[in-house]
Amino acid sequence: QVQLVESGGGLVQAGGSLRLSCAASGSIFSPNRMGWYRQPPGKQRELVATITSGGTINYADSVKGRFTISRDNAKNTVYLQMNSLKPEDTAVYYCNAVNILLQAYWGQGTQVTVSS
């Protein structure tokens, strides 16, 4: 059984920072790509950032220059450092992992609320 356990969400004022973590465990066969998606209130889930095991990174335009994704391959853990947060970053943030068999897994989500 695969589990993605997220932590680090919360309430922060605009301009502040938060760091999200997601640890993958179980029979995930070494995740190839890990990343973060978010779902703002009343909107669809959207890509935030992804990183492959080789270090290739992709960011949504809306977070470039403010968010940094990183991972620890040995721990199957991915991080999202979020700086200069804006109210429009308010969303439930979901961790995602895709293994070499192209099986995708999701975390339970963690709430990030940015107050103006």
Image: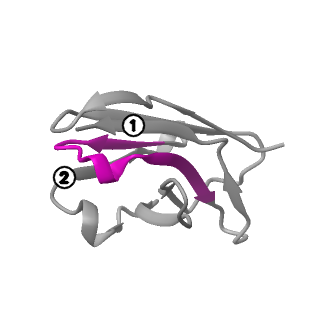
User: Residue 61 at what x, y percent from top left?
Assistant: 26, 71
Q: Quadrant of the C terminus?
A: top left
Task: Residue type at mark 2: give it.
Answer: Arg
- Magenta span contains residue 65: no
Q: Nearer the viewer, residue 112 or 33?
A: 112
Q: Is 115 above or below relative to 66? A: above
Q: Main secondary structure of the magenta part?
A: strand
Disc 2 target residue? 66
Q: Is 52 above or below relative to 66? A: below
Helix, strand or loop under label 1: strand
Q: Nearer the viewer, residue 14 or 46?
A: 14
Q: Which residues are magenta?
A: 78-97
Q: Please give the name of the residue rendered at 75% of the width and 40% of the height, measured from the top-left corner.
A: 26
Q: Please give the name of the residue rendered at 23% of the width and 47% of the height, measured from the top-left corner.
A: 86
User: Residue 70 at what x, y percent from top left?
Assistant: 34, 48
Residue 97 falls in image quadrant? bottom right
3 relative to 33 in the view: left or right: right
Q: Quadrant of the N terminus?
A: top right
User: Residue 95 at what x, y percent from top left?
Assistant: 55, 49
Disc 1 target residue? 113
User: Residue 89 at what x, y percent from top left?
Assistant: 34, 50
- Magenta span contains residue 86: yes
Q: Please give the name of the residue rendered at 39% of the width and 37% of the height, measured from the top-left corner.
A: 113
